[in-house]
Amino acid sequence: MIRLTVLYPNTEGAWFNMDYYLQKHVALVKERIASFEPVRVDVEEGMTGAVPNTPSPFCLIFSMTFESLEDLQTVMTMYGKELVADIANFTNIQVIMQTSRVIEPLLEVKRR
């Protein structure tokens, strides 16, 4: 599986309009990728750093996972410019994007 992760660093002077992001941007992303059957789409809002009561290094992390690199590349070729251009409507943060191969499935932890 292949995952695209978009990181929004929590930097000084940054602003982020969560309402626009959730109501408009995520809806646009879902509309554009619907026919490509992503395996998973996640939106994570940063709460704290590894040490309690410290700032989160990222205010938001978005990821979408596909069965193949070809599916992801097709989505980005067709809609990448449009989706990236929309970022200016909800934040001034310079995003970091990474494409990764998912090596291990989610770990299952048994409770005691």
Image (cartoon, grey):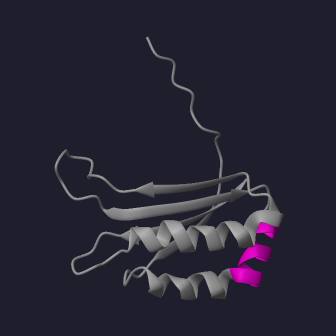
Is residue 19 magenta-colored?
no
| Position of residue 73 measured from the top left corner of the image (x, y, whole percent) | 76, 74
Query: Is 81 left, or right, of 24 in this rendering?
Result: right
Residue 60 visible to an observer of this rendering: yes
The residue under the point 39% across, 80% down is 91
The vertical placement of 99 against 94, above or below, is above
Residue 69 visible to an observer of this rendering: no
The residue under the point 46% across, 16% down is 111
Q: Main secondary structure of the magenta part?
A: helix
Closer to the camera in the image, 90 or 36: 90
Count the marks: 0
| Position of residue 88 measured from the top left corner of the image (x, y, whole percent) | 46, 87
For the C terminus, the image quarter is: top left
Which residues lie in the magenta part? 70-79
Is residue 76 magenta-colored?
yes
Toward which corner of the image does residue 28 lie, by quadrant?
bottom right
The residue under the point 67% across, 82% down is 80
Query: Is 99 left, or right, of 97 in this rendering?
Result: right
Furthest-left residue in this view? 53
The vertical placement of 24 against 65, above or below, is below
| Position of residue 10 measured from the top left corner of the image (x, y, whole percent) | 30, 69
The residue under the point 43% across, 80% down is 90
The vertical placement of 1 against 59, above or below, is above
Query: Is 45 left, or right, of 81 in this rendering?
Result: left
| Position of residue 71 measured from the top left corner of the image (x, y, whole percent) | 80, 67
Furthest-top residue in this view? 112
Toward which corner of the image does residue 76 lie, by quadrant?
bottom right
